[in-house]
Image (cartoon, grey):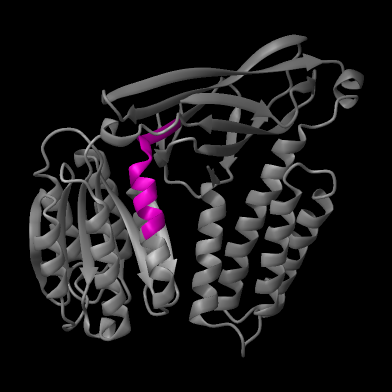
């Protein structure tokens, strides 16, 4: 995995304190083709509560069958359904398409939503997987966890524990308007997976197709970045919503899985105190860790020093900021504005929500002219403007809230392939 670090301002004025944004760019290698990929170990955990009856469950069965038909015989799949009880429809085993599709056809709606029980059964099945290859729970629900463990913090902590202890990841799919989007995005973050939103049954097939393509292209798992500021340098914050934890000497940020040819960015801000001497100065270091997939599965670690060049005030002032870093900061701040606007709207503070979205859209439009990513900037601005129009009591709904939440989540991920 290639890594490159860029500062918004590489030249800093000597004897002056600074707040500087730094952008880490990660470029994943191409995905292996055909038989070279490692086998997948998947647990498909499907909500069959009463609210799934009808078209939702029919589409879910079709999507599950789609996944089965595209897996190789060397892959392993378990199928778990849950309502107030958990059923192991098919234990983890090499893919037998006929048997699995027949089992999927027997799924019928039931009662309440024991989300924790279904997810835990998926993790239990994947713990039996032999050999190398990704282990992932694909969790689908359309409702709130109301049986079993229902505390969001506990469910998120359990997901993170499964990732760290058993290397079992979690991807979530929220269906309709009645599920807890904050829980599902938090579980996906903690599980190093993806959070998907299907507002209508029509959206589900595309999500399963996207997820399958991603699984086929996995090249690295458990990607993490440790940021270690030098003495007297302070890490002010990370502009993304990735899970992070304090470690000796710094902060570790979990980025989850990485796909072939994928580019990801991580932006953070440092406070650099007044430094008296001219020249190159190390202000931090980054430790990149991940597990490679392919013919050989192995842990990789790279340490990257971060340096700035201290020059005279006049020389520093004569050099423009790195435009791409500045643009990335503005895009990420727009995601934060979206989240804050959503929080205001939940409290009925629609004027404050509209103001946040309007200002963020204006920043994006001012930045777009001459930018290499002008189309993305303007598209994001238009999306914010659309959401601004929904910031009133008659228009703001559960669906708008979920759409805003998932838009912010996707922006924070900054995945590009």
133 above or below 405? above
Residue 211 highlighted magenta (yes or no): yes
Q: How many marks?
A: 0
158 sits left or right of 88 in the view: right
Which residue is found at the position 42% from the left and 39% from the top? 259
Residue at image position (24%, 50%) is 71
Closer-to-camera residue (56/305): 56
Say above or below: 8 vs 85. above
Let me know if residue 130 appears in the view.
yes
Location of residue 356 in the rendering, given as x and y in whole percent from the top left corner: 71, 66
Q: Is residue 182 visible?
A: no
Q: Position of residue 97 (x, y in %)?
A: 15, 57
Percent across and percent down for residue 297 are 26, 26
Q: Is residue 247 above or below residue 352?
A: above
Q: Residue at x 79, y 24 (%)?
A: 16
Q: Quadrant of residue 387?
A: bottom right
In reply to whether residue 4 is colored magenta, the answer given is no
Tell me which segment is drawn in magenta: 209-225
Q: Is residue 14 or residue 298 the one in the foreground?
A: 298
């Amino acid at each position: 995995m290639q890594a490159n670090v860029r500062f918004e301002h590489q030249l800093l004025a000597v004897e002056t304190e600074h707040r500087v944004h730094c952008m880490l760019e990660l470029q994943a290698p191409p995905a292996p083709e055909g038989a070279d990929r490692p086998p997948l170990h998947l647990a498909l955990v499907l909500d069959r509560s009463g609210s799934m009856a009808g078209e939702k469950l029919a589409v879910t069965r079709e999507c599950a069958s789609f996944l089965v038909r595209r897996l190789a015989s060397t892959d392993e799949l378990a199928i778990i359904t849950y309502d107030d009880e958990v059923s192991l429809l098919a234990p983890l085993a090499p893919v037998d398409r006929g048997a699995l599709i027949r089992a999927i056809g027997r799924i019928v709606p039931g009662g309440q939503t024991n989300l924790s029980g279904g997810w835990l059964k998926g993790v239990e099945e994947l713990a039996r997987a032999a050999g190398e290859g990704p282990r992932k729970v694909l969790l689908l629900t359309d409702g709130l966890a109301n049986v079993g463990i229902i505390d969001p913090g506990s469910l998120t902590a359990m997901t993170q524990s499964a990732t760290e202890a058993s290397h079992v990841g979690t991807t979530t799919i929220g269906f309709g308007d009645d599920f807890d989007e904050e829980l599902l995005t938090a579980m996906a973050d903690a599980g190093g997976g993806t959070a998907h939103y299907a507002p209508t049954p029509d959206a589900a097939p595309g999500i399963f197709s996207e997820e399958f393509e991603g699984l086929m292209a996995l090249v690295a798992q458990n990607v993490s970045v440790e940021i270690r500021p030098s003495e007297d340098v302070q890490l002010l914050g990370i502009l993304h919503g990735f899970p992070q934890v304090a470690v000796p000497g710094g902060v570790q940020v979990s980025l989850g899985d990485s796909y072939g040819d994928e580019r990801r960015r991580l932006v953070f801000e440092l406070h650099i105190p007044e430094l008296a001497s001219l020249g190159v100065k190390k202000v931090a270091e980054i430790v990149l860790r991940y597990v490679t997939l392919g013919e050989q599965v192995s842990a990789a670690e790279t340490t990257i020093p971060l340096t700035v060049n201290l020059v005279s005030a006049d020389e520093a002032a004569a050099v423009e900021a790195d435009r791409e870093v500045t643009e990335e900061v503005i895009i990420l701040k727009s995601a934060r504005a979206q989240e804050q606007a959503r929080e205001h709207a939940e409290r009925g503070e629609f004027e404050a929500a509209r103001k946040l979205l309007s200002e963020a859209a204006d920043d994006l439009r001012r930045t777009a002219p001459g930018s290499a990513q002008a189309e993305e900037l303007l598209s994001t601005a238009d999306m914010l403007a659309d959401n601004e129009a929904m910031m009133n009591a008659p228009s703001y709904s559960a669906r708008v809230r979920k759409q805003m939440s998932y838009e912010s989540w996707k922006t924070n991920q900054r995945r590009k392939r």
